[in-house]
Amino acid sequence: MSSVFTSTYHDTPDGRFARAGIALRRRVENGLSIWEVELPEAPGEVALSEPGGPAEPPPLVADLLRGLLRERELVEVATLQTRRSGEDAPVDAEVHDEVEVLEDRHVVDRFDIDGAPQDPGLGVVRGRERRKTPGGKRSALPHLQRMIRRQYDEILAHDPGTRLGTDPESLHKLRVAVRRLRAFLRVARPILDRAWADELRAELKWAGRALGAVRDHDVLLIHLRAQAATLPPADAAALGRIVEGMEQEREASRSEMLEALSSPRYLELLGRIELAGEAPRWNGVHRSVRKLAGREFSKFERAAKALGPEPSDSDLHQVRVRGKRARYAGELAEVSVGKKARRFVARAKRLQNVLGDHQDAVVADERIRALVLSQSNPQLALAAGRLVERQRERTLRARGRAPKTLKKLRRAGRRAWR
């Protein structure tokens, strides 16, 4: 048996869907018209589908893609007609697709695909959309533009998945893109109009807070669920009460996050980021990316030198923040500086992993204690005590690894920026 269906891919005139790795298509088979969305977190899988006519996407699809569309028109970028055979074969068997690419109802290309029963067109659309990147100029401004555009594309790519909420990684990647963008603007302060940069960073901070509350709950819940699986049944059942309380808090935070993502303020922020990628507000000062990166590394090194033999949790967290800023500055300079900058960034990522695990354990300890104090349950207190002790072990392991990791990063920084 074989089937025939037509897939018409849509995008904005500037190709933002293709750049984000998102597919929006209207698939017609046996007279039934279905709009489908694929997200970059799960290529080849339909994240959302809704019936609808050719005029425009149905409301649920349009709402999911609100951040990308922002009242822009959609255009047809590719139409593919596929004849598929083998769908009635055993479950693990491959299907065979004969695909024709159409323009004005005329066939302009043909190709065959054997494999999983996925829509074959996203690769064709991506092949038609190529993004040029700026060259290796040493001036900081073109490097900043490139990084702003890259983070903007990341935000657009993971905005729909964050709204959908089926994969926590969508939210994580969106939050990282917002934080990185804010950090790049901070690094580039010496060459930017201060009021313009600070105002944009303030809006990014607002968006980051809305995302961060949900993400922080996700990280803690993943850890607690994993820990519950290692406890005796009675303790695991008691711990379930803590997990339930956190899940309720997460849902409240998610409702607030979705409200923020649907607000005019957020949509206006996306527009401002797009404009910033095209024309950052330059103040006329020239600085090289190496100099900007060296400036951030010096701040990090001063903080690292100030650490005593038994630094407080707060001191380690501040060094982690300084290290992250130095890392982002290094990423800004990678294209220009090359191998030494890449090595520095790699070392900085390792430090972030070590000190990030330490901070996660500190936060988990605080949250577990607070939730236990809000309830009077001896079994719960016993289970929580075991978890608190494990958080203490996590912090000790991280503290043991931190000095060597710090030393390697400082050495890589001196080689890269001095």
Image (spheres, grey):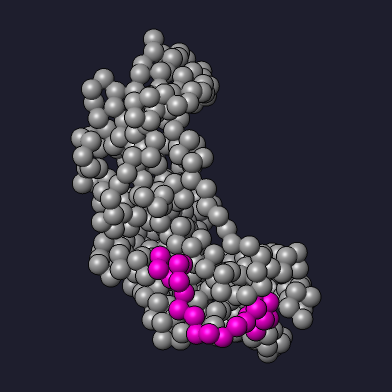
Which is nearer the eye, 136 or 232? Answer: 136
Q: Is residue 360 visible from the viewing direction of this image?
A: no
Whether 357 is drawn above or below 118: the answer is: below
Q: Position of residue 273 (x, y in %)?
A: 41, 68
Position of 337 with respect to 360 (left or right) is right
Q: How many marks?
A: 0
Whether 198 is drawn above or below 128: the answer is: below
Whether 309 is drawn above or below 228: the answer is: below
Q: Which residues are magenta?
A: 274-296
Position of 176 with respect to 346 (left or right) is left
The quarter of the picture where the C terminus appears is bottom right
**What residue do we see at 56% from left, 74% from top?**
141
Q: Position of residue 378 (x, y in %)?
A: 40, 66
**What residue do we see at 26% from left, 61% from top?**
262
**What residue do we see at 28% from left, 70% from top?**
265
Whether 336 is drawn above or below 89: the answer is: below
Q: Is residue 126 visible from the viewing direction of this image?
A: yes
Quarter where residue 370 is shown: bottom left
Q: Position of residue 284 (x, y in %)?
A: 53, 85
Q: Does the stretch in magenta take in 293?
A: yes
Which is nearer the eye, 308 or 330? Answer: 330
Position of 254 with respect to 137 (left or right) is left
Position of 403 with respect to 173 (left or right) is right
Which is nearer the eye, 136 or 299? Answer: 136
**What residue do we see at 66% from left, 65% from top?**
136
The quarter of the picture where the N terminus appears is top left
Q: Does the stretch in magenta take in 271?
A: no
Quarter where residue 78 is shown: top left
Q: Position of residue 146 (x, y in %)?
A: 54, 64
